[in-house]
Image (cartoon, helix red, strand yellow):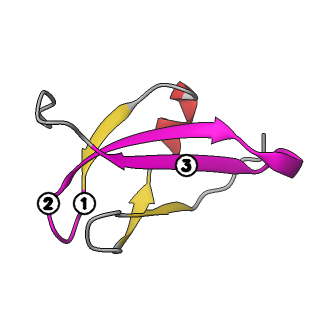
Amino acid sequence: MSSSSHHEYMCPQCNHINALPDRALRNMYKEQLTTCEKCGCKLEVTPADGINNQINIVVAIAGQEYTVP
């Protein structure tokens, strides 16, 4: 797993590029709830190991059962 100070993901609703804090990488393979900085869409973000020591960030729109503080 490669550690970088800058990780980004794209909102599936509006295509805005959001930043992922490094602390989120401590919880690999666990859904984390957040909101898009631009459109406010509720998102489920899951960091995972990728190929060649890269980090994959899986992003999906959160279901209605989730609320983001």
- Residue marked by disc 1: 36
Query: Mark 1: which amino acid?
Result: Cys
* Local crowd size for mark 1, using a 10 Å CA cut-off: few (<14), some (14–19), many (≥20): many
Give the magenta part as a residue range. Answer: 36-61
- State whether residue 36 is above or below residue 64: below
Q: In what element is the residue under mark 2? A: loop
Image location (x, y in percent) of residue 53: 83, 46
User: For the image shown, how many numbered marks are present on the structure?
Assistant: 3
Query: Mark 2: which amino acid?
Result: Gly
Report whether 31 appears left or right of 57.
left
Q: Return the disc, 3 or 2, that comes first in the chain's sequence.
A: 2
Say which quarter of the image contains residue 47.
Answer: top right
Mark 3 vs mark 1, CA separation in Å: 14 Å
Image location (x, y in percent) of residue 65: 12, 27
Q: Return the disc, 3 or 1, that comes first in the chain's sequence.
A: 1
Mark 1 vs mark 2, CA separation in Å: 5 Å
* Local crowd size for mark 3, using a 10 Å CA cut-off: few (<14), some (14–19), many (≥20): some
Query: Mark 3: which amino acid?
Result: Ile
- Residue marked by disc 3: 57
Report whether 46 appears left or right of 51.
left
Q: From the image, which quarter does the N terminus lie in?
A: top right
- Residue marked by disc 2: 40
Q: Residue at x 35, y 63 (%)?
A: 12
* Local crowd size for mark 2, using a 10 Å CA cut-off: few (<14), some (14–19), many (≥20): few
- State whether residue 31 is above or below residue 19: above
Q: In what element is the residue under mark 3? A: strand
Q: Is residue 13 magenta?
A: no
